Image (cartoon, helix red, strand yellow):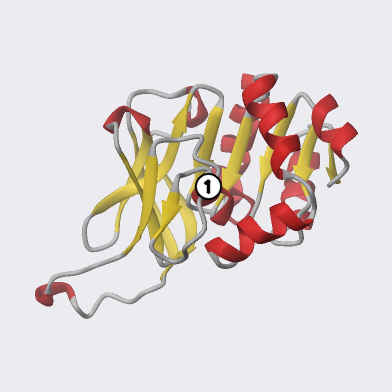
Amino acid sequence: MLIIVDYQMGNLGSIHNMLRRIGAKAAVSAQSEHILAADGLILPGVGAFDQGMKSLQAHGLLPVLEEAVLGRGKPVLGICLGMQLLTRRSQEGSLPGLGWIAADCQRFCFGLEQCQLKIPHMGWNATQPAGGHPLFAGLEEAAFYFVHSFHAVCDDPADVLAYSEHGYRFAAAIGRGRVMGTQFHPEKSHKYGMRLLQNFVEMI
């Protein structure tokens, strides 16, 4: 059973519906017993970094998630803000992130010759998998839907699972061990998002 972590900051219904379409057993919950009993977790998220961390704390989820992911080794997939929360910190806020991946989030910053590019980066964009990670199996030529102004910068390039470009190349997905995250929204990315979620389910 997959648990979509409900901390009041994500597209829970859309993710749940796509998981059902691929035949995965999933539920939306903030209950510690459900999270600790899950086979895998999805951490969605839409909004600001500090707001996300405050919401996790307000719902009592920080120690539960740490036990589930770090203590028990459950796989987790962060989506959009959920991916950013996996990192140490963000330029967007002042609170520390979960710190499960050695990375920081920074705002897109373009040179003068690219100043016409818009922030947030919004819409469909191609991705290039890096390193043959199983999360991107069969997605060598794929495009996903993005809505974001910040992106992760990993200490170790090996933690970048896929790249995309908006003015310059940035990490579209990151991961270390069983902790993974996508900056894009698979639940809004039609057949490509469905394949990525299927890959995640098959990794559990």
Q: Residue visible at 39% across and 36% down?
A: 102
Residue 127 is situated, as x and y percent measured from the top left of the image, at 37, 45
- Where is residue 78 drawn, in percent x and y? 58, 43
Res 115 → quadrant: bottom left
Q: Secondary structure at mark 1?
A: helix
Residue at point 60%, 37% (across, down): 77
Q: Label 1, on which residue?
A: 83
Instruction: Report whether 203 appears left or right of 60.
Output: left
Examine the rendered structure and indicate whether residue 126 appears above or below residue 8.
above
Identity of the residue drawn at 63% across and 36% down: 197
Rendered residue at 50%/45% (across/down)? 182
The front one of 57 and 40 is 57
Residue 158: x and y in percent read: 31, 27
Quadrant (top left, top right, bottom left, bottom right) of the N terminus: top right
When asked about the image quadrant of residue 193, the answer is: top right
Q: Quadrant of residue 107?
A: bottom left
Q: Would residue 92 appear left or right of 17 to someone viewing this image?
A: left
Q: Amino acid at mark 1?
A: Met
Q: Is residue 117 above or below residue 164?
A: below
